[in-house]
Each structure stands twice: as structure tokens, then as C-alpha cells.
Image: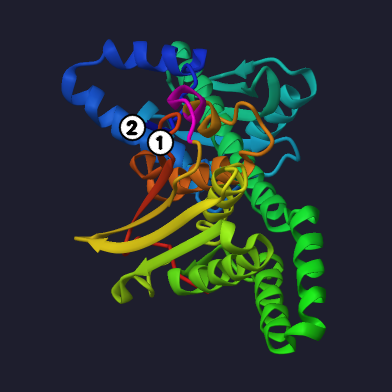
Amino acid sequence: MIAAQGAESRADPPGAARRWRRWIRRLPAPDALDTLAAGSRIAANLRDGLTGPRAGAAARELRALLDAEAVGLVDLQSEQTWSGTPRPDAVELAETVLRADRKAGRNGLVALPLRVRAELSGVFVVAGPVRPSAARQAAAWVGEALERGRLEASAAAAEQAELRALRAEISPHFVYNTLTTIASFVRSDPDRACDLILDFAEFIRHNLARHGDYTTLAGEFRAIEAYLALARAVLGDRLRVQVRIAPEVLPVAVPFLALQPLVENAVQHGVERAEHGGSVQVSGEAMGSECVIAVEDDGPGMDPQHAREVLAGQPAGPSLGLVNVDRRLRTIYGPDYGLVIETAEGAGTRVVMRVPRFHPGVVAQ
């Protein structure tokens, strides 16, 4: 059985980043280290834009880095952030750059356009005896930092959109079969019909709930048990289930809807596709400072290369749930915490999710 693990994609560094690195390499070693550290802080402080809550700190770092009298960051709405006292003509010069979309300068004052993917995004103003090449390098790097902030914001928005889609992704086929099964028990076994209605309500409530991004493993397992109860009612003896969860991991906070897609995948692609059905095993245990959850089925399995394609989102469609979970785990916990799929043709499938038992910012709501 071969394991397939999702890979974290990395884009090639933009041209501004390459130019910045070439500038760094020309500095003496101590200055290069100081500049790299300052650059990291500037990038972090510009994540919210040129006039965000930490833009002032970025302007101060840039002023110190260039040894300038004053440094200004001006956005497209002419909102300004300054370090040092701006000269009276600095604002006018920045307005000129915004209108003409090209650099301007006068008497020890230079204003440079800031670009994100070739589009004007603001103006970088420097006052004082600063080398033009240094000012241009700084402006190019600020543009790259703004682009990185936009990409991070876009990624966060896409993640939230995927989570909303996942919450709404309830199979009409599953709902129809569940309701039909419940209806068949109304007369013959009303108590079981009542229990299944409650399970169905719990399943729907968990999927459509408007609470936050995180829940506890206990909450996830309640929804999983409701889903499996409904699936057993529909599939009958074709589905065999075993759930083993260590009590100490139940309070662990995890991303909302992190486990249910794994179980649904095991039922739909492992059990339902097998002529005589099969079994699904769900386990959760603590391993040191981490929690390991595994969902295993004894279905037909798959080619390991296909498993890698599934985690890469190719082909898109049925794998949306697994891809979403894998991406969210990597975004929240880092690249070492994505899903691992252990599978081979004819050998079933085992999906493993490993998360820290405690992680900053991950709190169940």
C-alpha cells in the first residue's frame, strides 16, 4: 500500500523579489542580515495595504533602511502614511504620480509609482539624499509585499468560499434515499423512524450551522455518527461500521467539517462501489502532542497516482471535500499537516489526518 500526500505549491518569485535579493547580496554580511530582517517585518506590516493599521511601522522601517529624512506611502485614494515630517510639496508630487502614472522628483524629493502586477497601486515618496537605485529597489519590493498581501487575502476569501460550498454540499441522492428509508419505517418501526429523523436533523444542523471556523472533535464525531446511522439505514447489511475514539482527544479543536468528508468518501467510494458492501473504520487517538484520526475502508482502493491527483484537485468534482480539507489543514497548521492517503488497487483506502492537540488561534466556538 502506497501513501500519497498533498504537495504545497510555490510560485516563482516575482521580478521585484529577485531584484531585491540581488541588492541584498551586494551588502556586507551583517548589513544583509539586518536588511533581510527589516524586509520581513515590512512585508508583514504591509499585509493590510498602504494605510492599514501597521503601515506606519512599515514606513518607519523603510525610512531607517534608506536613511531618509522622510518616507511616505500613498494609496490610490490619496490616503497617506508617513514616517518623518513630509515636505509641503511631497503630497503634491505624489498626486502628480497618481495622475501621470510615472515617477517624479524635485530638490531631494522623489515619488515612485507602486505596482502590483503592472497595475498602479499607490506611490512611494522618499525625501533626503537617498540613492535613486536604492529608492527604486525599495519601491519594487514594497510593490511585491502588497502583491503578497493581496494573494493572501484572496486565498483566505477562496478558502471561506470553499467552506461555504462544502457546507452546502449535501447529496440530493443521499437525502432522497434517507427520507425514503425513514418513510418505510414509519409504520413498521416508528421508534426507529423517530431515531432516524433525529439523526437526519443532527446531520443537517451540523452541515448548515452558521457557527465559526472551528469545532471540537466531539462535535465532528456526533455529526459523523448521525451520518453513519443514516447510511446504515439506507445500505443495511452492506455497510459495517467501527468507531474507536480515545476520550482524551474529544476536546481537541479542529477545522469545521474536517472529518465528515473523509467518512463520506469512504462510504461512497469504498462501500457503495463494492458488490457486497464493506466496512468503514474510524479511529482517533493521541500521539504525544498530536492527534491522529484515520478513516479506513476495505473497498476497491485506487492507484496511488490517482490518489495524488485527488489531493491536487485533479480531476475536480467528487474530490472537492478531500481537497478542501487538505488545503485548510495546510493553511492552518502548516505544510506538514495535510491529508495522507494510503491506498492501492484492490487494497482499500486509508485517509490519515494529523493535527496538533493545541495550536494558537485554533479554538472551538
Residue nearer the viewer, 103 or 122: 122
Q: Does residue 340 sit above or below 286 in this rendering? A: above
Q: Does residue 243 sit above or below 75 in this rendering? A: below
Q: Which mark is residue 88?
A: none
Q: Image point 41% across, 17% down: which residue?
A: 20
Q: Which mark is residue 347?
A: 1
Q: Image point 69% across, 63% down: which residue?
A: 234
Highlighted magenta segment, given as a residue range: 301-307
Neighbor class of circle 2 (other Cα within 10 Å; few <14, some 14-19, many 20+) is some
> How many discs mark residues in the rendered view?
2
Q: Does residue 248 sit above or below 76 in this rendering? A: below
Secondary structure beneath dot 2 equals loop
Pinpoint residue 92: horizontal percent, then vertical percent: 72, 31
Residue indicated by mark 2: 1
Query: Contact (CB < 8 A) between labels 1 and 2?
Result: yes
Report the amino acid beneath label 1. Answer: Ala
Pinpoint residue 281: horizontal percent, then vertical percent: 42, 57
Is 258 covered by the magenta stretch?
no
Neighbor class of circle 1 (other Cα within 10 Å; few <14, some 14-19, many 20+) is some
Secondary structure beneath dot 1 equals loop
